[in-house]
Amino acid sequence: MRNTSLCYLENSGRYLMLHRVKKEVDENKDKWIGIGGKFEEGESPEDCAVREIEEETGMVFSPEEMRYRAVVTFVSDEWGTEYMHLFTASADHRRLLQLCGRENEEGTLEWVPVEKVESLPIWEGDRIFLRLLAKDAPFFSLKLEYRGDMLIRHTLYNS
């Protein structure tokens, strides 16, 4: 079982999205996701999110600049179980200049209008939690169960 963080950085109605196209073996291959990754030994969810944002974007955030929104449990017959700690944060304009079309070892970063994110190739379960973020839902727990790429069941708690 893995723990990961994922943060949706927002500015002017856009999310910073990572198009995962670089790694051959990648459960997110060709998908668009927020910024995040796996916990390192001894990290809290906030520590992981801060580190991953800096590694993937070069932007430095403090935990106080982020809002902890949810725990999403992914259960996959191919990839095992993952607890994803979901955050949002606002990115100011001075931080934006360094990110347009920036590439990292996993893919390409792009600012995408929030209303267009669901039209991108994303996981079906991501649509569920993105809608909850858009409604500014209180902290929630969401369980997503997949068979291959197909979402077969979802259960929402605490919302």
Image: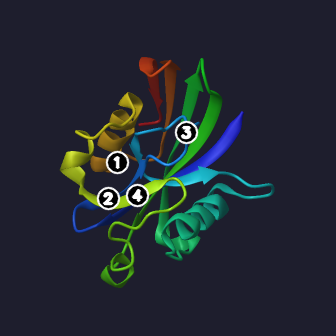
Residue for badge 4:
108
Q: CA distance from mark 4 to mark 1?
A: 23 Å
Name the secondary structure under disc 3. Answer: loop
Residue for badge 1:
133
Of the residues tagged 3 and 2, which is closer to the observer? 3
Residue 98: image location, x then y, percent:
39, 78
For marks 3 and 2, the one nearer the N-term is 2
Q: CA distance from mark 1 to mark 3?
A: 30 Å
Residue 92: image location, x then y, percent:
34, 78
- Point 53% across, 72% down: residue: 64
Q: Amino acid at mark 2?
A: Tyr
Of the residues tagged 1 and 2, which is closer to the observer? 2
Of the residues tagged 1 and 3, which is closer to the observer? 3
Query: Is mark 1 in CB contact (under 8 Å) with mark 3?
Result: no
Q: CA distance from mark 4 to mark 3?
A: 15 Å
Q: Amino acid at mark 3?
A: Glu
Tell me if 102 is positioned left or right of 79 in this view. Answer: left
Quadrant of the drawing holding the N terminus: top right
Quadrant of the drawing holding the C terminus: top left
* 87 up-or-down from 62: above or below: above
